[in-house]
Image (cartoon, rainbow, N blue to C red):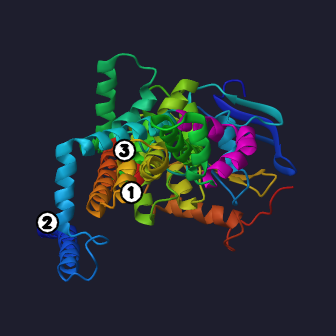
Amino acid sequence: MTNSVSSKERVLPLAVLLIALLIWTAISLLSLFPESVFPSPVAVARGFLEELRSGRLVDDIVASLFRVTTGFGLAVFTGIPAGLWLGSHARARHAFLPLVNFFRSLSPLAWIPFAILWFGIGDLPTIFLIFMASFFPLVLATIAAVANIPSVYFRVGRDYGFSSTEMLTNVTLPAIAPQVITSLRVTAGLAWLVVVAAEMIAGRAGLGFAIWDARNGLRMDLLVSGMIVIGVIGIVIDRILLQLTKIPSVRWGYER
Amino acid sequence: MKDKPLYVEDVSLSFGSVVVFERLSLSIERGEFVAVVGPSGCGKTTLLNLFSQFVQPSSGRVVCAERVRMVYQHDSLLPWQTVNENIALGLRRLKDAGERARQLNDMLRLIKLEGFADHYPHQLSGGMRQRVELARALIGDSDVLLLDEPFSSLDYLTRIRMRNELARMLDQLPRTVVLVTHDIEEAAQLADRIVVLSDRPAKICSEFHVKLARPRELTHPAVVTTVHEILAELGLEHEGKQSAVPA
């Protein structure tokens, strides 16, 4: 019973995708819109293969992923420690929180002019923009997670003689892990949104640049193929980070 | 009081303008099971915090000569650790790995959770979690067990079952116990001595002794009589002894 339900559930999203594809095909077969503004699935598939064979697609994917990994990685390795520190120092938190909130509310795209002015065109400005997009939400999420740790866990640590290092490694870090993982997923999604926008303006390669280039060349088929690749990679990134939530010692955060 | 392992003497304690204790004295014998009951907010938990040295008195003496373990009101098992890892916290001083494993196994058998060593707390029922909490506090070389309403989040039947479990565990691993509870039945069913505290600033209104071996039936005449007497003391039953709160 359970098995048939779960296999049915697995088929459902595929069915929806198939229907969407059929509608797309039908609209383009009926020629409701000119091919130049509404490319057919076949044209898009052909464009995709063309990009794949020329090697441009792979280059663009590598360029975008490199930027996201670097910018996001930098944000993780600075934002989480900053959040830990602010989360456990009330006065510092009080002092810094308005500033962090300000930058969190500021669209990272507003930094594009400065990014180009400071770093030129290429990898650096994009990495900077991704960092700006991910750092502040990660800091805020970590602060909130630290502030929400029930104090009884620290009392237990004290009762059983934890050192201050053990308080960090055996209480604080495992206690915030589920919330931090959730925010990693959200922030990685944000970083992936930002890389496309940033590359459109400040890039010489990458998926965002490819889309912009396709638009300039009026190649709507390549544009749609780029969009699909971007969406699929976004899903794959989230799926990979989703695996973190399956670690046994963090399951409690999602099942309670 | 020198020979008593656990006592507070002339202890006063205030939090801001709230006076919790004013010259309170209470001593506990080695191996004794004392229950502390009283109105909400009268300072029962604070008394345990004094014994565990988590809170320091404004004046007076607190002596806790022995190794103390506390069981808390709310879930205090570390949710990211398995049952085994949580219980093993109580064995941190023990370096010999073989001996640790042996004691852990014995404890799991005692709390009847042999098959659950690698489960996480959220995978257990409330009663099972509470047994693990007790196991963590009882394992190793502690002498005094401070219980802060340990069963208050459980349903009635599980609570009764847990009282018997606790009695059984203490029979195997005797400890000096201070139990803070709202549950007068629980106090009468488990404790050798029941201390009734007044409203803030808390004073000892009266003490009741129950000389009956554990585990005790909830409906045993001695238990029922004690419950009745405590309720009367708290002004919740009109027959029987109805002394006023001593000034």
Report the magenta residues as a range. Answer: A78-105
At which x and y percent is residue B239?
Answer: 67, 73
What chain does mark 2 sit on? A
Q: Earlier in the sequence, mark 3 or mark 1?
A: 3
Closest to the observer, A187 or B75: A187
- The amino acid type of the residue labelled 2 equals Ser
Do pointers 3 and 1 mark residues of a single chain? yes
| Front: mark 2 or 3 | 3
Q: Earlier in the sequence, mark 2 or mark 3?
A: 2
> For mark 1, what is the residue?
A216
At which x and y percent is residue B165?
Answer: 39, 49
Direction from residue A108 to residue A247 in the image, left or right: left
Spatial CA distance of label 3 from label 1 is 15 Å
> For mark 2, what is the residue?
A7
- The image quarter containing residue B132 is top left
Image quadrant holding the C terminus of chain A, namely bottom left
Q: Earlier in the sequence, mark 2 or mark 1?
A: 2
Direction from residue A76 to residue B182 in the image, left or right: right
Magenta span: predominant SS is helix
Tell me if residue A157 comes above or below residue A176 in the rendering: above
Labels 2 & 3 near each other (Cβ < 8 A): no
> For mark 3, what is the residue?
A206
Membership of B59 in magenta stretch:
no
Closest to the observer, B233 or B61: B61
- The amino acid type of the residue labelled 1 equals Asn
- Crowding near pointer 3: few (<14 within 10 Å), some, many (20+)? many
- Label 2 secondary element: helix
Closest to the observer, B240 or A97: A97
- The image quarter containing residue B161 is bottom left
Q: Residue at x 30, y 51 (%)?
A: A233
- The amino acid type of the residue labelled 3 equals Gly
